[in-house]
Amino acid sequence: MMLSLVLLAAVAQAPSVEDLRGWRTDFARRTVPLAEIVAGGPSKDGIPAIDRPRFETVLQAATWLDDREPVVVVEVGEDVRAYPLQILIWHEIVNDEVGGTPVAVTYCPLCNTALAFDRRQGGRVLDFGTTGRLRHSDLVMYDRQTESWWQQATGEGIVGAYAGERLRFIAAPVTSWREFRQASPTGRVLSRDTGHDRPYGRNPYEGYDTRSAPISGFFRARSDARLPAMERVVALDVEGRSAAYAFSLVARRRVINDEIGALPVVVVLAPGTASALDAAAIRKGRDVGATAVLDRRVDGRVLTFEPAGDGRVRDRETGSVWLLSGRAVSGPLAGRRLVPVPHGNHLWFAWAAFRPDARLVK
């Protein structure tokens, strides 16, 4: 574990009255106790969000991205973009517009939560920054319009004018650079030309996800012993129903056909994606795989899937073969697309803290 994490944990504390001075936030409006929100080390915007992102072609980005490196994929209409974790790990938030939709692409390394949101709320477009604070180890964001505080893992406003409101999730699966460039050769990639001097490609949280537990100074909630605290899970929240699928389970099964409420889904894990939180160089991280969660319906028909090799799946009804992105590449349904379902690859301790009622799929 890097010394910086140990030092940060030592200073974690709940905000005092003096800490809250300078904020234009209505602290009288809140849905959680302020005592649960602790200092993470950096000050407000000490971890700078990217507000004017620049992009490169797949060919340009191939000069500095390794095949196994993890990237967050956001697709709106015909606009497909990749946000490498080697950049997000240093900035945590990118305020962008994809396919005409204002989006915030976010990543909290301490919870391994890579999530994207629609930035529109109550008729206005919000811009997000980092508060420098954590709740249950998770990034607390703020919007610059009202300086309300938002929980990144859930998209919920927890303090200020937007307390009790919730941002809409946009599907943002994490996959390998190899998978992205093969599925979206004309896609665009977030450039390392961010206006900030950072050692992109280095992991400042070396060895973090091989710990046995989260950092105690940052995580003060009750642990859920149903899984090891640092186990990755496929985390789903659909219309108030939550579920979690342990990576170890999905890795064995490769494909899980399930239903969340009335929504039939398929959960897939394919090898070939490095952990961003393991080795000092992200490209050398151990293989943890990449996941996809897709709506199994096509023209009102529910399909049943099985592994097809090389990270692909096959539906039993037509024999069509599908990529992780949800596009059929062969068979009677070639060219059709399955709708991706927003999900995360959270560390178990975090998902269990925010969704203690989640169904853990055995």
Image (cartoon, rainbow, N blue to C red):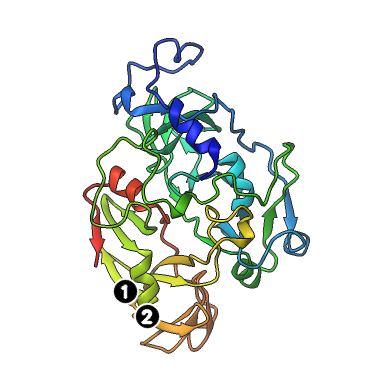
**Residue 139: which quarter of the image?**
top left
Asked where in the image residue 34 lies, by quadrant, the reply is top left
Residue indicated by mark 1 = 257
Residue 261 visible (yes or no): no
35 vs 358: above or below: above
Residue 296 shows in this picture: yes
Residue 15 x %, y %: 40, 19
Q: CA distance from mark 2 to mark 1?
A: 7 Å
Q: Amino acid at mark 1?
A: Asn
**Which residue is pictured at 69% across the width and 57% down the height?**
188
Element type at marker 2?
strand
> Would you call the spot at circle 1 few (<14 residues within 10 Å), some (14-19), or many (20 or more)?
some
Q: Is residue 330 left or right of residue 14?
A: right
Q: What mark, if any, has residue 305 been given in the picture?
A: 2
- Taking depth in this image into account, of 331 and 225 the one nearest to the observer is 225
**Residue 95's image quarter?**
top right
Q: Which tag, 2 or 1, sits closer to the chain's start?
A: 1
In this view of the protein, which residue sits in the foreground, 175 or 116? 175
Q: Residue at x 52, y 52 (%)?
A: 277
Residue 207, x across and y down, in percent = 51, 51
| Residues tagged 2 and 1 counted as in contact (Cβ below 8 A) | yes
